[in-house]
Amino acid sequence: MSSERLPTIIQGGMGIAVSSNQLAKEVAKTGNLGVISGTAIDSVISRRLQDGDIDGSIRRAMSHFPNQDVIKGVLDRYFIEGGRDQSKPYIDVPKLTLKPVQHAVDLLVVASFVEVWLAKEGHDGLIGMNLLEKIQMCIPAQLFGAMLADVDYILIGAGIPAQIPNLLNQLALGKPVAMTVDVAESTMKHFISFDPGCIEGLSFPIKRPQFLAIVSSHALVAYLNKDEITKPDGYVIEGHTAGGHNAPPRNKKSKDEEGNPIYTEQDEADLVKVKNSGSPFWLAGGYATPAKVQEALAAGAQGVQVGSLFALAEESGFTSDLKQEVIDSLTSETLTVKTDGSASPTGFPFKVAVLPKSLSDDDAYEARNRICDLGYLRTPFERENGGVGYRCPSEPLKTYEFKKGNVEEAQHSQCLCNALMSNIGLGQLRPDGRRELPLITLGSDLSGPDYLAKKHTDGWRAQDVINYLLGK
C-alpha cells in the first residue's frame, strides 16, 4: 500500500446512508478518506427514485453507468416522475437470497455505482465503501458496482472478511466469483455466485481498490495476515466504545444488571502486536479528540476512524430533526448511549442512543408490530428437507419459532433495517397509518461530540470535524 495516499482521518461508514455521498465527498475534499455506507443501498436508491429523484442526482450518476439497458430496467421498475403518492407505501426491493433474481442483482450493482460515483464527483480525493460481512449475500455485486465507479477503498467489518481480498482480485479481472455464505444447521457449503459478465459491454481489468478489514483483535490481524489470499491491505482496529455493531466480549457470560455485555482489558487489541504485523492500521472507537488522534499516531497507527462526530455533521444522512435532537441532548448533558446485547438481529452487541419517540423507548418498541420485510439481516438456514430457508429474530416470534429459531434470544430483537431507513427519512408507511420509528446508534465515548455540541449549538459541518481532530 502506497504511503502517499494513506489518510490520517477515515470517516466511519455508518448506518444505512448516514454516511451519505455528500458527507463522504466533503471529507475526501480535505485529503482524508470519505466513506459511503453500502448497507441496504439498493433500498435507499429505489426509495429515492420512488420519491422522484427530486434533484436529479441519481439519474445523473446513472447516465455514466456503462450499460444503459440495465439502467432502463431499474428506472422502469422504481422511478416515479414527481414522486409517489405520500399516502402510499414504498415498493420494497427483492430480499437477498442465495439465488437472486437478475433485476435484484442489477439494482445492487447500480445502486453501489451511483452512491460511489456521486461521492467521487468533482474532486480527486479518496472514497471508500463500507459493508458488513454479516450481510454476505449482497457483497460480490456491491463490490463490483463500487469498482465500476472507481472506488478507492473497501472497508468491511461485523465478521471475518477473509474472502474479500481474493474477490476483489477476481472481480478486477472480470472473472466470475463464488463467495461462501454461512448457512445455519448445514453440513454443506453454500455460495453466492456473481458473474461480472451480467453487465455487458465492459472491458477489463478495472481498478482493484485497497481493502481495509475492520477488526477488534490482534489475533484476527495475525490470522488474516497468514495467507496472501486473505491478507487485507490494512486494518481498522475498532474498540468496543465504537458506535453501531461491536465484537462480542471474550467473556460472553459477563453482563450487567440489564443483561448487556461488559467489556474488560482482555477485549482490547495489543497495539504493539498490531504494529509489528507490518500492516498499516487505524484506530477506532474513542478516538474522536485531537489528543486521541495524536495518541494513535504515537502508537504507530496511520490515523483514526471516526464515526459519531461525522454522523452529526450537516452533510450526514440523518434527518435534520434527529441530528438536532441528539445535539440538544448532548448540550443539556442528558444523552445516554448503552451497549445493547439483544437489540441487533445479528447477535452482535449494538450501541443504542436512548431517545424518546424512537425504538429505544420500551413502550414504542412494544407498540410496533413485528415484521421483517426488508430482510438484510436474515440468516440462511438449512430446512429439514435439505432446502435453504431464511429467518430473522426481529420477525414475528411464532414465525421465527416455526423456522427453528431461538425464540428466547429473539424476544427483544429490534428491526434495524426499517429503523435505520427511518433515520434518513425513508421510513416505511404501514397499513394502520404509522411510520416506522428511528433507532439511533452512536459511540459511547461522547467527549468529542460533547465538545463540538457546545461549540456549535446549531450543528457543524464535516470540515469542522476535520479541523477539530487535526487541531487546526
Image (cartoon, rainbow, N blue to C red):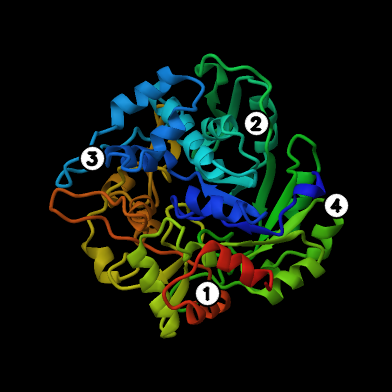
Q: For residue 278, which numbered disc appears in the image?
A: 4
Q: Residue 276 placed where, x, y %? A: 86, 57
Assign a secondary structure to mark 3: loop
Q: Residue 310 placed where, x, y %? A: 53, 63
Q: Is residue 6 above or below residue 205?
A: below
Q: Quadrant of the N terminus?
A: top right
For marks 1 and 3, the one nearer the N-term is 3
Q: Marks 4 and 2: CB-CB under 8 Å?
A: no
Q: Amino acid at mark 3?
A: Gly
Horizontally, residue 470 falls left or right of residue 54, namely: right
For marks 3 and 2, the one nearer the N-term is 3
Q: CA distance from mark 4 to mark 3?
A: 52 Å
Q: For residue 83, which numbered disc appears in the image?
A: 3
Horizontally, residue 297 falls left or right of residue 418, namely: right
Query: Foreground residue, 140 or 397?
Result: 140
Q: Residues within 10 Å of mark 2 (few under 14, many from 20)?
A: many
Residue highlighted by disc 2: 167
Query: Foreground residue, 368 or 459?
Result: 459
Q: Amino acid at mark 1?
A: Pro
**Is residue 144 among the parts visible in the rendering?**
yes
Q: Marks 1 and 4: CB-CB under 8 Å?
A: no
Residue highlighted by disc 1: 449
Assign a secondary structure to mark 4: loop
For marks 4 and 2, the one nearer the N-term is 2
